Image: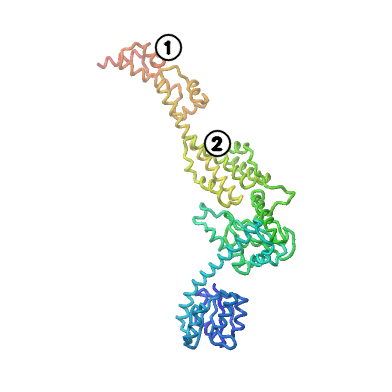
Amino acid sequence: MHTVILVDDEVFVRIGLRNLIDWNSLGYDIIDEADNGEDALELIERKKPDLVVTDIRMPAVDGLELIGRARSAQSNACFIIISGYNDFGYAQKAVRYGVHDFILKPIDERELTDALTQLHRKIAENKLFDLRNGDLRKERIVDALIRGDFEDEQLEEWAKELKVDRAKEIHYAFLEVNDVHPWNAPEPPSAEQWREIIRRRIVEAGFAEAEDDAFLKEHHGRFGLLIACGEASGPRGDAAAYAAKLRQAVSDAVGAVVYLYLGRPVSRLAELRDSYLSAKDALQLKFARPDSQVIYCPDPGEGSANYVVADDAFRRQLMESIEEKDAARIAEQVEATFREFKERRFAPEAVKSAIRQVVAGVLTLIRSMEGDDRALTTLEPIVGWQDLNVSPGELKRLFLNFVLESAEEIARLRKDCVKGGIQKIKTYIEAHYNENISLKSIASIFFMNPVYLGQLFKKTYGVHFNEFLLQIRIGEAKKLLRQTDLRVYEIAEKVGFGSADYFVTRFEKLERMTPTEYRNKLLEKK
């Protein structure tokens, strides 16, 4: 809503202006009235309205003088003049002062509505322009303070611009919105949209009087801000309560998990760099304090975050559980992994490294089994999270989903691999049936346990290995008996029997006749 002050020395005119149109539906809110130019000027300076609708002829200070004095006082308000006199000279002066419109009494409802509609966008654009210019100026000031690039003479003016001139202590802090990502929010807000949402909420919650008072500086997916406390207190005193309320207000507004990282207090703006650096230290404790959403910089005796890569033993154990498709054990190990992150105070980069190790191991295994890792629906989130803001709880969920789906995929690939492997064994037997082969020798060739191979063969083809081999050999022997005049002992040797007598015995048992009887039976049919 754009704010409006009505100025006219006749009360009934002001009442008529209020009731003539629906100001709210046009995006305006009448916040006050004045019946003379002097009072109006005081209201303009104090309430900083977006629009002033004023009569041109009033006692003491008329409308044009009011506008001129407001402009001299650096007011950015827009003006609409209402007059009962069609005076070209007044209109000329109004144009020079940058008045938006000159409307004659009696006021026409349509004319005023059209003027306000046209003005609404201009005011919004001016506000955005002023806000961005103010943001840029404040960012440059804060950057200079962080670099230590300033003169002491500048500090008083800068403190006023940053609205910290009355503060007894100042904290630099980072505000971070988490878990709003492409895989659970199709169109996440842009950084500029986040800035507008957060700034609006800061004002609505009473943490700043106006949007241009709320300093927000983007830092790689999070926002830097200043927290100024009016009373002297320790780092866990008023500032902590302020930070907690601010974090909750923003979280409620955006409907997401929000973290606030609070730097140490400093008493002078010249020391802001110290608070900024300690706030950066607090960023590293996100996984060390997974149950806190307001995270303070580490105390001197507390120790800093751990950047050491996780022990490889945890990766090997988890990979073993994934390969065995042990869902219960996987869940336990993921919980244990995140406990380790907390207990050993892993910095976010160390957490990323540990997660990457497991993901790389899983993908390597899937590819070695001739699988397609792109089929994993959980792959994009567990790879893409590293460039986004993800809470420890959300990361645990993404990671667990990834390893569970990977375990399912690896089990499926193993079945396909076993199925393909047993087919290769069958093909090998069909090609080498005439050699001195056995279940043991074939198991050795294919690096398998003989007992397991025997069981798998029977399960796959419905016959034992020895029966299958015998069927192939007898089948080939029958073909030779039909197509050649080779002697029985020669045929026995060609199909892999070391003994002619054993061949005859096995042939007779399977075909209910000897090889010779089989051949003679074929000759009789001629």
Residue 260 in percent (x, y) is at: 64, 57
The answer to whether marks 1 and 2 mark residues whose Cβ atoms lie closer than 8 Å is no
Q: Residue furthest left?
A: 526
* Mark drawn on residue 283: none
Identity of the residue drawn at 52% across and 41% down: 406
In terms of image quadrants, where is residue 484? Answer: top left
Residue 258 in percent (x, y) is at: 61, 57
In terms of image quadrants, where is residue 404? Answer: top right
Disc 1 from disc 2: Cα separation: 46 Å
| Residue 90 at least partly seen | yes
The residue pinned by badge 1 equals 499
Identity of the residue drawn at 49% across and 88% down: 84
Residue 144 in percent (x, y) is at: 63, 59
| Type of amino acid under label 2 | Glu
Q: Earlier in the sequence, mark 1 or mark 2?
A: 2
Q: Secondary structure at mark 2?
A: helix
The residue pinned by badge 2 equals 323
Instruction: Name the image quarter holding the N terminus.
Output: bottom right
Residue 346 in percent (x, y) is at: 65, 45
Residue sitting nearer the eye, 415 or 152: 152
Residue sitting nearer the eye, 97 or 40: 97
| Type of amino acid under label 1 | Ser
| Residue 241 at least partly seen | no
Instruction: Identify whether 506 is placed above or below 424.
Output: above
Which mark's residue is nearer the viewer, 1 or 2? 2
Looking at the image, what colour scheme do you see? Answer: rainbow
